[in-house]
Image (cartoon, rainbow, N blue to C red):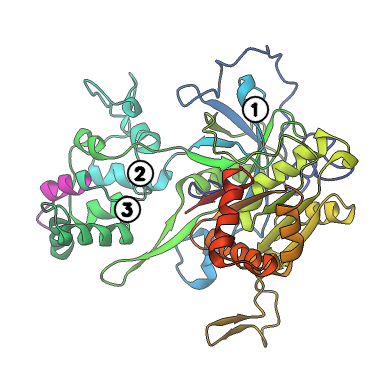
Amino acid sequence: LGGEVEGGVGVGAGVGAGAGEGEGEGCGMGAAVPTGSSAEKAEGDDDGAGIDAEHPLHAPIVCARWLTAAPSAEARGDDVRPEAEERAVLHLELDLSGGCRAIRHLEPGDALAVVPANEPKEVELLLDTLRVDADERVDIASPPAHLAGDALTAREALSSRVDIGSVSTWPPLPLLRLLVKAAGAAAEATLLAHIGRATAPVSSGARSAHVELQREKPSLVELLRRLAAAPPLLELLDVLPPLAPRWYSLASSHLACPERAHLCLSLTKYVTTDAAGRKQLRRGVASHYLAALAAPLLCADAAPDEPPTVRVYRRESSGNELRLPKAVGTPIVLIGPGTGLAPFRAFLQHRRYQAPRKQLGSTTLYFGCRSKADDYLYGEELELMASTGAIRLRTAFSRDADLASAGYWRGVRLNIPYVQDLLEEDGLRLCEALFDKGAHLYVCGDGQAMAADVHTALLRLVEATLKVSAAAAEEALSKLVAEGRYSREVWI
């Protein structure tokens, strides 16, 4: 969840003492669109827009701003050089007033499903490569749910119904088998042979060949062009996976921001390299789709007359969501580097409105990023809360250390601060909170490295502070998990 789960994984109403009273506050750095008064809602309208995937809400995007510097021209283009790898994080506010009661009262820790669309430029290239009329009707006798519709056109099918290169298993084997059959005389012999190995009967060689293609992740347009293939549209649609929704953790509370949902998302980008050493920049579908929709709010001097809309719906609770303790007096420890901060911003807003400050348990927030100047998300809000005593704030900026002394020596990291270093510094305080005061511990963010590093740091500090064995430290943390007092939300 969060980044774009495309990872996983938010500024409007302020957070902290004396802030957050007004809906939409804090959006002065981006354009805001007035949406008028909300329609009257019945308490039992749980079968309306946004209740599920079959009934999405077309939610207006009413406020948008960059939480980091706006992406440069290099970052927006196809440049694969290091300077094009800068991070860009976007804050959006969605108006949920037209939705059902369930989506207007999402809880902190909930995620909102965003229904994305493929990049228009990529869709146009596909239509051209397939030699298909964009308005051609797609008539399937017994269509699967994602291709149902009486007036479905080729453009709509390729834009919003099927995935054309973003799923983790891309390219899927059924697609590769179709492309082998449809390959033209001018097909690249090396690629065709590679796909032939990947689609051979099950063997270790076939599996490794497919894994290599998944690592290269060639787009559908790229595959079609390199294989000189133009399979029939219906056959192609039949082997393409559905375009899945992306889940974003709420970065706001409905108590602080009625009928609004704040999202905090990174523009996902990564570079792949094929067997010939050619580099390709890949973009996250949903994050760039949302950024394109919000462009009028981000760039225009005046707000557009009509706000852009995005299809969203609520996710049925699984029971595994991050949830605040039922007792407002319970201490909480939040560990959310980068956009992992999103659900914890919702937590902080919610607690601010739940009870008077004196009744609230202590809150400690650990936040980390590369640079305080460049990607300290919601830094002003957090600093304000810390200055008023609403939270204890611990921050780590890994690239702000003295360059002359930062680096590695014999595999040991020196003067490059990370959140896990702060945890170990606070070992005694954390152990007292967790094992003596009943605190709840939450971790949110990158599951590839951060979550494992944080867990390792927790094990070390428990072992050192309580003077127990590694096995006993692991058992102590496992007990917290079993009691529902150590919760994680991570994305890969």
Badge nearest the viewer, 1 or 2? 1
Q: Position of residue 284 (x, y in %)?
A: 46, 51
Place of residue 472 in the rendered image (x, y in percent of width and height, measured from the top left): 57, 61
- Read off the residue under disc 2: 124
Cα–Cα gap, marks 2 and 3:
14 Å
Residue drawn at x 23%, y 51% as measured from the top left: 224
Residue at x 23%, y 21% (from the top left corner) = 142
The numbered mark, 1 or 2, whose residue comes first in the sequence reads 1
Report the residue marked by disc 3.
219
* Image location (x, y in percent) of residue 30: 72, 46
Magenta segment includes 206: no
Which amino acid is tagged 2?
Glu
Bounds of the magenta segment:
175-187
In terms of depth relative to the viewer, which is nearer, 126 or 474?
A: 474
Question: Would you say 163 lies left or right of 38 here?
Answer: left
Query: Residue beneath label 1, please?
Result: 96
Element type where label 2 sits in the image = helix
